[in-house]
Amino acid sequence: MLDNTKKKIAVLVIDMLNEYLDSKGKIYCKDCRAIIPNVKKLIKYAREKGFKVIYVNTSHINAKEPEIEKWGMHAMCGTWGAKVIPELKPMKNDLVVTKKTYDGFYDTKLESTLRKLNILTVAVSGIHTHVCVLLTALGAFYRGFKVIALEDCMTTGYKPNHENRLRFFKTHVGELLKLDDFSKRYEKIDG
């Protein structure tokens, strides 16, 4: 049973992009950098265990998109801002799914990718807890995936939003775990 478990889990790394996490980014969130070490540990752990690592990245294509109208031009497709920060750079076996909205499932290939890989559980990480991470987690929940929200692998610049949404993850979406608890749960799985 444990052998097969690793093939059923995907770690979603949401919007860990230059635009948000580099001081030269257009929508820089200095406080959000605090989770980078934990997300790095999560990705390393996932790769060692054979879990699929999927980056879910904002990548806008035109000025008429609702997020562009709300927040201005940012994370445009093919630009430096839409690339994952160097510390968390995707590797050869990782996947990247691009999105144009807060929800990583809306009008993307995320669901079909997860289904093709026979994924049953997604562990969510990234920024921002109250928007992109939450809406992507809800998208997974609504599509029948088990959702594990990794409390110390997600954040936002406004802490009250973060704290309120953590409770929502736990009561309405799935499990809320810290990285260490997630790691301990699957420690018997060989990578």
Image (tube, rainbow, N blue to C red):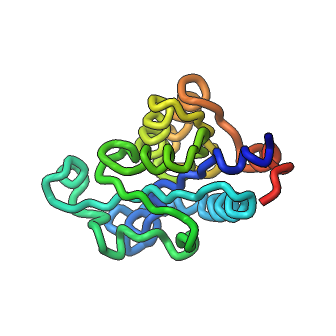
Q: Give above or below for 24 relative to 137.
A: below
Q: Give above or below for 18 relative to 66.
A: below
- Residue pictured at 54% horizontal, 52% vertical: 12
Q: For this view, does 70 lie left or right of residue 133?
A: left
Q: Residue furthest right?
A: 188
Q: For this view, does 32 lie left or right of residue 45?
A: left
- Residue pictured at 35% horizontal, 61% vertical: 27
Q: Residue furthest top?
A: 171
State the image quarter where residue 73 is shown.
bottom left
State the residue in front, 138 or 156.
138
What is the x, y in percent for residue 184?
A: 82, 46
- Residue pictured at 59% horizontal, 34% vertical: 146
Q: Give above or below for 170 relative to 185.
A: above
- Residue pictured at 50% horizontal, 62% vertical: 95
Q: Give above or below for 94 relative to 121.
A: below
Q: Quadrant of the C terminus?
A: bottom right
What is the x, y in percent for residue 15?
A: 44, 57
State the residue in front, 161 or 91.
91
What is the x, y in percent for residue 117?
A: 55, 50
Q: Quadrant of the N terminus?
A: top right
